[in-house]
Amino acid sequence: MSERPPATAHRGAAPSCRTPPPRRAARAGKAAFVILGLALCSLLSGCTQIRYVAQASLGQISMAWNARSLKDAIGDARLPWRTRALLREVPHIKRFGERHGLTPTDNYRTYVELDRPAAVWVVSACEPLRFRSKTWSFPIVGTVPYLGWFDLEDARDFAEPLRAAGWDVDVRPAGAYSTLGWLEDPVLSTMIAHGDEALGELANVVLHESLHATLYLKGQTRLNESLANFVGDELAKAYLDERLGPTSPEKMSYMREQARSEARARALHDAYLRLSRLYASPVSDAEKRAEKQAVLARLAAEIGARRPLNNASLVQFRVYNSGAPELRALLATCGGSWPRFLGALRKLERHRFDAPQEHIGKVVEPLIQSGCR
């Protein structure tokens, strides 16, 4: 599952108990069938907990049950005009991505109005004096350093034993996620931001998640997410330029948000490097813990953190924000052609990695040296 931070949520009605339309029932049935197969596979292989599989199954079936076509949502006068206008852009965003090499899918043909501020809550854990994540393994996606929960209390309940065992734990909201092509992903109300940056943010999420349906390397979460972040960020800018123009209010607002995000990323990166050096130093564990708290307190004040920061927070940042210089260099080597860029990266699908790759540059550099062939 791939996640993105939340934008905003519109309050919706509770799920109806009336008999669903045939298409809605079919989607829910397909979701139930696919997830049941994945659950059985996971349980038989001993790779995950029954509780996690159960909540994921019920959450996904609920999504499918409550999804309605974009056409119906766009024509629903009960939805805010602004929401409907943004939903009209989704087919254009998908076609734009396909013209730039992303795989056509049946995703984002439906809309789900959520009655919560996030699509899922993501739990991750890390050792307290070393940047080594706890991981979970699944038959389809391989090893991952996080688990997404559809209910906040379930996420907190899952996180508590990890904290009690001594892990640094982070529980963060995500506004979107991808089922990697197993199911038809809907547009979610949590994918729609408040301000003029909303179109750029929506394009970013759709393009980010579409990248996962185009290229996904089993067990390589950092590479998968960092690549999706790079593609979403860059193609969203290009989409706004083409659709509205480089000086449109929507583009300018989106770029301001991107600048704030990049400043936050630099601060997180600097803190990660400082703590990496600290953990590798010969000082006592007590001194490391004291200095760690000081570094994290300064970081929280600098970025205006809304939740406690710890090693798990910083590791998750690295998962989504690694290798951008090398990916940008590969795109340049490919003459700025996104189809060529993605074609070069698809060579990695034939490569057998012995372990999750921590240094994206080392993976991408050979593709640059080969001249994007």
Image (spheres, rainbow, N blue to C red):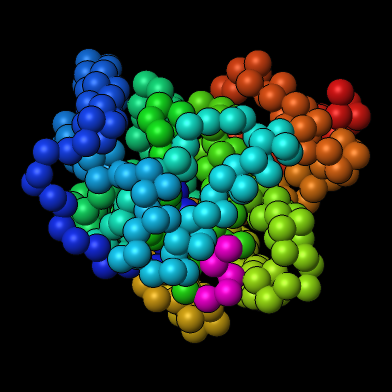
In the image, residue 30 above or below residue 205:
above
**Could you tell me residue 267's position as x and y percent?**
61, 72
The extreme left residue here reads 17
Visible in this render: residue 313?
A: no
Q: Name the spot of residue 196 as percent of width and height, x first.
A: 58, 74
Residue at (69%, 24%) from the top-left corner?
A: 346
Question: Quick check: is 198 in the magenta stretch?
Answer: yes
Q: Main secondary structure of the magenta part?
A: loop
Q: Quadrant of residue 248?
A: bottom right
Q: Is 186 contained in the magenta span? A: no
172 vs 67, nearest the viewer: 67
- Residue 215 visible within the image: yes
89 or 166, which is in the foreground?
A: 89
Q: Would residue 293 be found to the left or right of residue 227 on screen? A: left
Specify the segment rendered in magenta.
195-199
Residue for point 25% across, 49% down = 150
Question: How far across and how far down the image is residue 131, in percent?
Answer: 49, 51
- Position of 112 compared to 98: left or right? left
Coordinates of residue 350 in the picture (x, y in percent): 65, 16
Question: Which residue is painted at 42% across and 55% down in the image?
Answer: 74
